[in-house]
Amino acid sequence: MRKHRYVGLRWLADVAELLRRFQETLDWRYLVTTARAAGLQTLLYTGISLAREYFDAPCPTEPLHALTPSAVRRRLLQSVLTQDALMTPVEMDDAGWTHLAPAEVLLLDKPSAMARELRYRLFPPADRLAGPDRAGNRMSLYASRLVQRTTTLLRR
């Protein structure tokens, strides 16, 4: 799922196809336990529930119920992962910011992973930032990047 960066219908189509192809042999108990241990329970829940909604992918109710995140997190994700948002072409740049970046952070369960992801997206290493003055004033690079990111979110 991270390969597709959780955006667009492509990752949901992949999830739906996996569920169809392996529905008889998936070890749901192992999958749920592993997702929890890795801090990816919300990601797995979201991928499966959206694949069910948009592609009618098969999934037993019990594992999906076991993966269900808090009501607050579900509401936040629903507000970001709308059908329009999933069908909108993704704007990407060298450090991987898209209009769905807030969802990409919300899909992680561990606060440390969320903070690391957010920090990278807002303040990546200066050598990852594009522009002629990469080695110059690091603060101006970060300020410029923060303005660009805020603009991307507000365009939505």
Image (tube, helix red, strand yellow):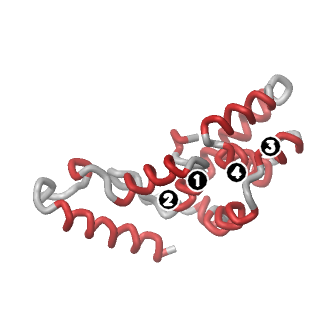
For label 2, the residue is 101
Can residue 83 be seen from the camera position used here? no
Discs 1, 2 touching: Cβ within 8 Å: no
Of label 3 and label 2, which has the lower sequence position? 3
Which amino acid type is marked by label 3? Ala
Which class describes the residues within 10 Å of circle 4: few (<14), some (14-19), or many (20+)?
Answer: many
Q: Could you tell which of marks 1 and 3 lies nearer the N-terminus?
A: 1
Q: Vertical placement of 44 versus 70: above or below?
A: above
Q: Quadrant of the N terminus?
A: top right
Q: Which residue is mark 4?
A: 46
Res 45 visible: yes
Q: Residue at x 63, y 42 (%)?
A: 40
Residue 152 is tagged as none
Q: Residue at coordinates 13% horizontally, 62% vertically from top-left? A: 137
- Please name the residue that numbered disc 1 is placed on: 8
Label 3 and label 2: CA atoms lie apart by 25 Å
- Please report contact status of discs 4 and 2: CB closer than 8 Å, yes or no: no
Mark 2, residues whose alpha carbon is within 10 Å: few (<14), some, or many (≥20)?
Answer: many
Q: Earlier in the sequence, mark 4 or mark 2?
A: 4
**Distance from the alpha carbon under mark 1 to that under mark 3:** 16 Å
Q: Is the residue marked by circle 1 packed among few (<14), some (14-19), or many (20+) residues within 10 Å?
A: some
Residue under label 3, please give it. Answer: 57
